[in-house]
Amino acid sequence: MSRVSPQRTLTKELLITQYLTLKKSTPTIAKEFGYNESSVYQKLKQFSIPTRNLLESLRLKYTYISLPDLTKELLTTKYLIFKKSISDIAEELGYSRDFVHRKLKQFNIPRRNLSESQRLWKCNHVLLSGAVLEFLTGELLGDGHLDHSGPVSSAYLTSSKHVEYVIWLAKVFKGFGIGQAGKIRCQTGTLRSKKYPNRIYRFKTFHYISRRYVELRTLQEKWYRPATREERERGKKFVKIVPTDLVLTPLMCRQWYLGDGSLGSGITLNTQGFTTIEINFLASLLAGLELKTTGSDTRLCGTTYVWKKSVKDFLDYIGLCPNQIKPIFGYKWERSRS
């Protein structure tokens, strides 16, 4: 017995898109969304959306409305990479759901099975744009990581010896719509010095992990590559990289500095985990901000260095240290140290 797809709610935003923007007729909207024509017309009146007169309707009926080409590349990006549903793609591009379904079949794009569709439907979603994306990017340039264990979604992980900083991060992410998974975990232990084997150091680290989101998975694919054979032998599955389309902003640089920066005579950014090419690329981005910068150098051991003459300009660019974490990180803004 075949199942009937549930009706889409005729919201004001949906009707404005379909009727005013895409210039669809009320019979077309009714047919595509499972309503009768009178219901669509009543909704237009309810939302005070101006209806067309007879002359406008006739003119539209015999006028071709241009829609974006539904190419294989476009569908692959929307359906496979961004994990959008057929309904979401249809609404976004102005086509019917059946038409998008036929195109997937025509281009031999593999459809999701029921369990995968349900898993995607149940997954958490968050809007990654603006300050949210800039904040996450700055964290990933530093000590932050994205989990890669799930096929559909990913989580953000970070750790610090300062519990105040981890609590502040959790609050910031919550404000961005990114929830926390479980509680902040405290780890204690000992480490033996490599240089002085008889010395043993005690440590205490606090770990944060976010809930899993589909959009974080997309970000993970941008920031990580599969490990090579040699890297896998060393226990790595994925390696963090610097996206080639990266453009720095003050918020990105502030989070990068908070996580992996230190202030001495100049500013040192710990970029040892990246390749020489990536480190020099980051240095060139900082140089583009008119900062005197040195990239990968044997003397710098894989760090990126902002010269003393540019320390003030760098700190002015990233702005002040957030008040909530000033007691633990305010020293990074004390220019008298440089």
Image: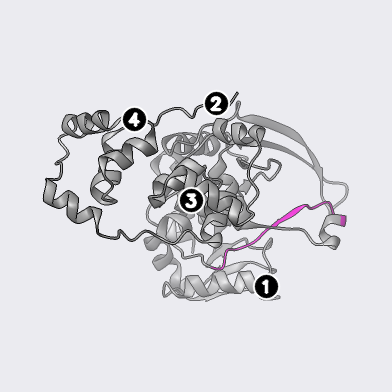
Vertical position of residue 318 compared to residue 51: above or below: below
Q: Amino acid at mark 3?
A: Tyr
Q: Amino acid at mark 1?
A: Thr
- Report the residue marked by disc 4: 35
| 241 part of magenta stretch | yes
Secondary element at tag 1: helix
How many residues crowd mark 3 within 10 Å: few (<14), some (14–19), many (20+)? Answer: some
| 238 part of magenta stretch | yes
Secondary element at tag 3: helix
Q: Toward which corner of the image does residue 60 lie, by quadrant? A: bottom left
| Front disc: 2 or 3 | 2
181 sits to left or right of 134: right
| Magenta-tinted stretch | 233-244
Say whether marks 2 and 1 touch (CB < 8 Å). Answer: no
Residue for point 58% across, 36% down: 120
Q: Earlier in the sequence, mark 2 or mark 3?
A: 2
- Report the residue marked by disc 2: 3
Q: Amino acid at mark 2?
A: Arg
Vertical position of residue 186 compared to residue 249: above or below: above
Residue 52 in the image: state x and y as whole percent: 15, 45
Which corner quadrant holds the N terminus? top right
Residue 20 in the image: state x and y as whole percent: 23, 47
Residue for point 62% across, 69% down: 278
Residue for point 49% across, 60% down: 337
- Report the residue marked by disc 1: 276
Residue 63 in the image: state x and y as whole percent: 25, 59
Q: Earlier in the sequence, mark 1 or mark 4?
A: 4
Residue 3 seen in the current view: yes
Vertical position of residue 335 compared to residue 115: above or below: below
Residue for point 66% across, 32% down: 115
Would you say the magenta stretch is mainly helix, strand or loop? loop
Q: What is the spatial separation of the Cα atoms under label 1 and label 4, in whole angstroms?
A: 60 Å
